[in-house]
Each structure stands twice: as structure tokens, then as C-alpha cells.
Image (cartoon, rainbow, N blue to C red):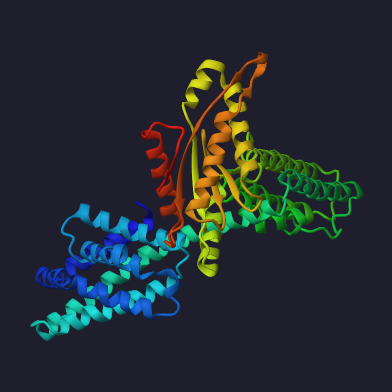
Amino acid sequence: MPSTSRLAAQTWLLLSEKTPERIRAVVARLIQQHKTTLATTFYTFMLDDAAARPFLSLAAVEARLKPGLQRWMEMLFCHSSQEELTAALAMQRHVGEVHARAQIPVGLVAKGLRLLKHDINALLIETSLQRIDLVRAVVYVDALIDVAFEEMSTAFVMFSERGARTDEAFRMSVAGHDLALEREKQSVALLEWEARFYRMLASGNLAEEMPNLQESEFGLWLHHKAPMLFDDSRELHLITECVERVDDALFPQLALGRDRDMQSDANRDLARAVLRQLDEIKFLLRAMFDRLVDLEVGRDVLTQLFNRRFLPSVLKREITLSRQRGRSFCVLMLDIDHFKRVNDAHGHEAGDRVLQHVASQIVNLVRSGDFVFRYGGEEFLAVVAAVDQERALAVAEKIRQQIEAAAIPLSGGQSVRVTTSIGIAEDNGHPDYQRLIERADKALYAAKEGGRNRVVVA
């Protein structure tokens, strides 16, 4: 359990210990009796709210959201064991992540929970609780909802920050950002600082104006841009430690010896220590870039398709466009049938050729405005923009037929044929893109279960 969740659990337990059991029982009974009315009032308010309305539909409210809110209230106020508490906290984190995926402003959630507090407390006032017990019940309800909101907000922020870094990386990729070029630029920047350091040593002029490594071109890149590219990588932490060691521990000692002979043993030792740190930074920099270059900044090395890292960025954008323009889009989930047989019969090199061929066929049969991803292994996913289910079905059938008809050349004059199963899901207005992926995946599973080499619509 994350540290924030442990703190929330402790706070939750403390609330339960400080609140008499009879008060908690009254609140639990009230929730059970009025959960339907509370959910109805909640979503009536939200549907009337101009800021909330774009994220809701009457059908979704009736089918999913009202029952979901009722389950949430039951889990929050009616738990009776440590296991149920753990499940309740996990639900708060899940709700926070769902809201982040759906890009629902956290302010709307706060507004909704404030309304819920008001309505529950209004119901408590109508009970036969005496004044002191009524105050205890109101404090208990408010505090419990606050703890739940804190847990949701923490998950919301963490998920949003990860998404923001991925969105930025995706924008850099689409703009043609070249990681190999970026690596070269930073290597040169580091070498320039090193060359300046050498000139200072050679001239013996320790008073020469020279920026700290953190203030150099490389240092600025390290602190401002590198974290977006490499997230929380081990190498990034180690490079930062090396830079700080140079600036804070080694370089100042060298600079303080400006009246001494540059050839002194102390200065030579300090200079060697600085250069050792620079060598370590170069090594770590190469290792860090090598790992990311393999991903081609979000492209699968074998097929040159986008990898699934950028799928959330694309789907969030398409959901927003669909909501703004009233035009649907579809997700196609494709899987090569019996792919393991290809590897077993012809080897992994043949398997790679099949993957490349299928990827090429998909790209050739969708439009330039569509997105094609290698989803994992022999699975592919296409986001087909501005189409309805009928048009997506025609595209999927064309892809399936084209792949089935083609003989894929292998080494030694051999060839192999493969088929694909495809699942289609049309955007239905749900703001959480994960639901769309799951529907497409279920349709793909149905295509597999139905005999393979077919298209199934969710």
C-alpha cells in the first residue's frame, strides 16, 4: 500500500475509534435507506452544471454512474472490517485514476462531494439524534468524505503527472524529435564544459569566469528537459549526484587555490577527481539514452509503429475531439492467429518478418490521420478517426482480407500465410478511454472464440 494510503487508513481507523459505534451505525443505516435519493439528487445537480455536463450523458448516469455512486457510498460508510477498509481505499484510488484518464477537473469532484456532504447532513438533521450525537455524526461524515477525497486527489495528481510527461514525449515524437540528435547535443555540451575546464587548468587562471556544471548548457538540460524524457530513471539520479559533487565538493576547493601553483599535488588530485566524475556522467548518459533510443521515442523498433506508451495521449485527444465535434471514432484491436506456430515452424526471424508485413498492411489500409500501434507481441491496435461502426467494419474487413490473401516471403525462397482476428469498439461517449480499449479487447476475444480470421463488433 502506498505511504499516502497507509496514512489515509490510519486516519480512517482513528475516525472510527473516535466516533461511537452507535453514531456510525446511524450513518450506515441512513446511507442504505437514502442512497438512491442521494445519487439522484447528486446527478440532477451535475447534469444542470455547465462545467460538468460535457462529461455526462443521461444514459450513462442512469446505467452506470448512479449505481456506481451508491456502491461508493456503501463502501465508504458501511465497511466493518480491515479488509473492507483496504478495499474502500483501493476504490478511492481507482476513482481518482478514472477521473484523471477522463480528464474530469478535480474541482468538479470537490464540488460534487461538497453537495453530497450537504445532502447527507441535511438527512442527519431530520433524525432523532440529540445535539451532541448529531454534531458527532456530521463531523464523522465530513471527515470521512475528506479522507476519501484526499486519496482520490493523490491518485488523480500522480496519474495526471505521468500522463503529462507522456503527452509531452508524444508531442516531441510527432514533431520529429530525434533522440539520437539530442544525445549528441548533450554530449557536445558536456565536452564543451570539459574543454573549458582543461583550458582553465592549462592557463593556471583559476579566476577565469566559468559556470558551474549545473548552470552550463548541459546542466540546464539535465534539470529541465531530461526529467520529461527519462522520468525517474536510476541513471538520471546518478548523473545529478555527479554534477552536484563536481559543483559543491570538488570545484570549490580547486577555485579556492587560485594563489597556489596549478601543478600542486592537491590541485592535480582535485582536477583528476573532477574529470573522473565527468567520465562517469558520460557513461551514465550513454546508458540512459541507449535504453530510450531503442524505443525510438515511442516507436516500436521492429515495426516502426507507435508503441502503446502513447495510446492514452491519442485516445484522450480523440475523445475530446469527438465530444467537441459530435463525430465518433473507432478502435480496432487485431491479433495474428496462431502466431506461435510461425515461430515454432520457421524461427523467430520469420516471426519478425510476419509482424513487419502485418504492420505494413495495416498502415497502408488506414488513412494518414489514423494511428496504428503495436499493442504487444502479435497484437496491434488502430485508432480510426471520424468514422462510425459501419465504416470501421469495412476497414477491418479489408485489412483482414488483405492479410489473408498475401503470401509473406521468408528466407530460402519459402513463404507463409497468416490470418487475423479483429475486434472493433466504437466510441460511445464514455470519458474513460480504458473502457473503449476493454470493449475492443472483448470483441477480439469473441472473434478468437468464434473461430478466428473474422471481425467482431463490440
Q: Is residue 112 above or below residue 379?
A: below
- 44 up-or-down from 241: above or below: below
**Residue situated furthest right in the rendering:** 203
Question: Residue 398's quadrant in the figure?
Answer: top right
Q: Residue at x 15, y 68 (%)?
A: 32
Q: Is residue 95 left or right of residue 206?
A: left
| Number of numbered callouts drawn | 0
Taking depth in this image into account, of 22 and 50 the one nearest to the observer is 50
Residue 122 place in picture, x, y as percent: 20, 83
Nearer to us in this view, 335 or 238: 335
Query: Looking at this rendering, what residue extends furthest in the top direction?
Result: 412
Nearer to me, 129 or 42: 42
Give the residue displayed 73% in from the left and 42% down from the top: 273
**Is residue 161 shown above or below 306?**
below
Q: Quadrant of residue 454?
A: top left
Rendered image quadrant of residue 303: top right
Residue in the image at 27% along x and 78% along y: 41
Where does the image place residue 23, in percent across and percent down from the top left? 12, 73
Residue 184's spot in the image, x, y percent?
A: 78, 44
- Residue 125 horizontal side relative to residue 277, left or right: left
Q: Nearer the viewer, residue 17 or 88?
A: 88
* Residue 148 visible from this viewpoint: yes
Q: Position of residue 416 (x, y in %)?
A: 58, 21
Left or right side of 146 for 244:
right
Q: Is residue 232 visible in the rendered structure shown here? A: no
